[in-house]
Image: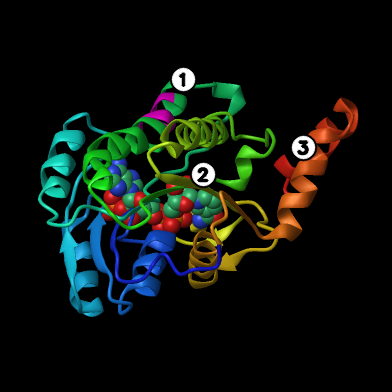
């Protein structure tokens, strides 16, 4: 515990072109790390890599496609001393309008946030197994996984699935010495949340979120949840009697 595990490592960050992933790349560059950056947009990744300097490799891929597994695996297998840390941050958010409930939204969210993350794990595990330096998987879920929230039938379900997938993986990989951390951020100011049309309590900037994630991982925490001021009320909301929960939920939909 407490020992820095994000220094002099080979760290793969997905979703690195924007928001939290980009802020993580900035926070982890210049620490002797070799960063491997993934997202769909090659141009943004190359621009970021140029601005970071140091040892950076760009591996563009669309994780919503099955072919991503092979593309990523080929590149990650090339890493000479393996992969030490994967930070799986790539994801998307779409809300559901229950008046026109659309299973396609659910399918899209599961495809990118859950199956896409699974593709990254499949692609990265062989390289991770070659690491001799405290290999670890860090996966970004969301505070929306804490309890059911309005319009989150697709996004919330995908993020709850991420928690479940990573918790199981933590058990199954423990014997191999691979540690797994699941991250549940509250609202972070990024292009993803700038589309939101409702109030976002305790909104924080991406740099602060990246700082919380790095600190939590370095402290050896298996679950990193922030900000506390949002996480506790959400836990409480989940435990309230149904009638109160529904009344509060309806106020949230109205933006009240
Ligand atoms: N912002 C928040 O309040 C918040 C809260 C809780 C959890 N999160 C989670 O944090 C993660 C990062 O979100 P963010 O807020 O930083 O959003 P963002 O700024 O929109 O960044 C999303 C990143 O994921 C990449 N991405 C999206 N779809 C992809 C795909 N199919 N294949 C490969 N890469 C893909 C994007 O790059 P390209 O467009 O170049 O592919 C981008 O780099 C997400 O998993 C999100 O669910 C965010």
- Is residue 201 visible in the rendered image? The answer is yes
How much space separates mark 3 and mark 2, taking CA atoms? 21 Å
Residue 102 in the image, given as x and y percentages of width and height? 48, 22
First to last magenta residue range: 107-111
Q: Is residue 125 above or below residue 18?
A: above
> How many marks overall?
3
* Residue 195 visible within the image: no
Q: CA distance from mark 3 to mark 1?
A: 22 Å
Q: Which residue is mark 1?
A: 103
Q: Residue at x 56, y 33 (%)?
A: 160
The label shown at residue 249 is: 3
Q: Secondary structure at mark 3?
A: helix
Quick one: label 2, few (<14), some, or many (20+) residues within 10 Å? many
Magenta stretch: includes residue 162: no
Q: Which residue is mark 2?
A: 141
**What is the crowding at mark 3: few (fewer than 14 residues within 10 Å), some, or many (at least 20)?**
some
> Would you place residue 188 above or below residue 49 in this image?
above
Which image quadrant is residue 205 in?
A: bottom right
* Residue 109 within the segment the image draws in magenta: yes
At mark 2, the secondary structure is: loop
Disc 2 C-beta below 8 A from ligand 1: yes
Residue in view at x 28 percent, y 76 percent: 32
């Amino acid at each position: 515990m407490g020992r820095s595990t994000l220094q002099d490592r080979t760290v793969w960050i997905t979703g690195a072109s924007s928001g939290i992933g980009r802020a993580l790349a900035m926070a982890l560059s210049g620490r002797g790390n070799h960063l491997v950056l993934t997202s769909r947009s090659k141009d943004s990744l190359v621009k970021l890599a140029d601005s970071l300097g140091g040892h950076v490799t760009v591996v563009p891929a669309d994780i919503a496609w099955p072919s991503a597994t092979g593309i990523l695996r080929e590149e990650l297998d090339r890493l000479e001393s393996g992969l030490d840390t994967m930070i799986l941050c790539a994801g998307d958010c779409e809300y559901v309008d229950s008046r026109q409930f659309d299973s396609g939204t659910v399918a899209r969210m599961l495809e990118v946030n859950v199956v896409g993350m699974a593709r990254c794990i499949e692609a990265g595990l062989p390289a991770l197994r070659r690491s001799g330096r405290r290999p670890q998987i860090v996966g970004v879920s969301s505070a929306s996984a804490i309890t059911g929230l309005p319009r989150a039938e697709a996004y919330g379900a995908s993020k709850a699935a991420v928690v479940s997938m990573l918790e199981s993986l933590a058990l199954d990989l423990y014997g191999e010495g691979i540690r797994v951390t699941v991250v549940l951020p509250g609202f972070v100011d990024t292009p993803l949340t700038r589309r939101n049309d409702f109030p976002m309590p305790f909104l924080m900037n991406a740099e602060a979120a990246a700082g919380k994630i790095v600190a939590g991982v370095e402290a050896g925490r298996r679950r990193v949840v922030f900000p506390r001021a949002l996480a506790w009320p959400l836990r409480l909301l989940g435990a309230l009697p149904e009638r109160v929960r529904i009344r509060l939920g309806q106020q949230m939909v109205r933006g009240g």
